[in-house]
Amino acid sequence: MRKFMTSLTAVATFTLAAVPALGLLQNAHAAEPTARILVGDLNLSDPAQAAVLRTRVDTQGQALCRQVIGREIRSNIREADCLAQIRLDVRRQLTAAQRADLRRSAAPSSLQVASR
């Protein structure tokens, strides 16, 4: 009987130790999906490098939106709306100087015309 009680105590202790661990796994799985987009290596006043940033944002954004939409079975979020929100979030996280450079790179360049 003593051996049975020792085994039962060991099983109960193991079970109680496993329950919080399962909760931690569930919480880790439930964490909000995130994406990291590198900006520091780009000169955003250069239109070509601004295009690189847009590509990075779109690539990471599409992957992130698929994760978010895939998690919520009854999601009514469209991928286009999700991507638009991510673009807005990225723009908000840029510094004021980076946003100004990005605006300048998107502006049409001046055209000089020679007249005779």
Image (tube, grey):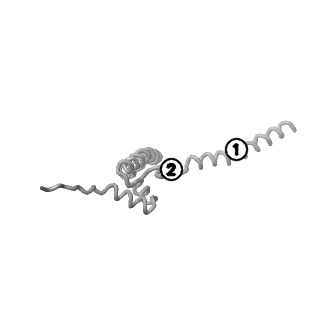
Along the line of sight, the residue nearer the viewer: 27 or 10: 27
Q: Picture coordinates of residue 88 (x, y %)?
A: 40, 57
**What residue is drawn where x is 34% and y is 55%?**
105
Residue receiving disc 2? 34
Label 1's element? helix
The residue type indicated by label 2 comes to Thr
Name the residue nearer the viewer: 83 or 75. Answer: 83
Residue at the farthest left position = 116
Which of label 2 and label 1 is nearer to you? Answer: 2
Confirm whether residue 104 shows in the render: yes
Q: Quadrant of residue 101?
A: bottom left
Q: Residue furthest front?
A: 116
Label 2: few (<14), some (14–19) or many (≥20) C-alpha neighbours in 10 Å: few
For image coordinates 40% across by 60% down, the residue present is 99
Residue pictured at 41% horizontal, 44% vertical: 59
Point out which mark residue 53 bears.
none
Secondary structure of residue under mark 2: loop
Q: Nearer the viewer, residue 62 or 105?
A: 105
Q: Position of residue 48 (x, y in %)?
A: 36, 48
- In the figure, is residue 32 to the left or right of 9? left
- Tell me which amino acid carries mark 1: Ala
- Number of numbered discs on residues: 2
Q: Quadrant where the N terminus lies?
A: top right
What residue lies at 43% left-to-right and 55% top-to-bottom? 90
Q: CA distance from mark 2 to mark 1?
A: 28 Å
Between 67 and 98, the residue placed more toward the observer is: 98
100 displayed left or right of 19? left
Residue 103 at what x, y percent from top left? 35, 59
36, above or below 1, in the image: below
| Circle nearer the N terminus (2, 1) | 1
Image coords of residue 108 (percent x, y): 27, 56
The residue where tag 1 is placed is 18
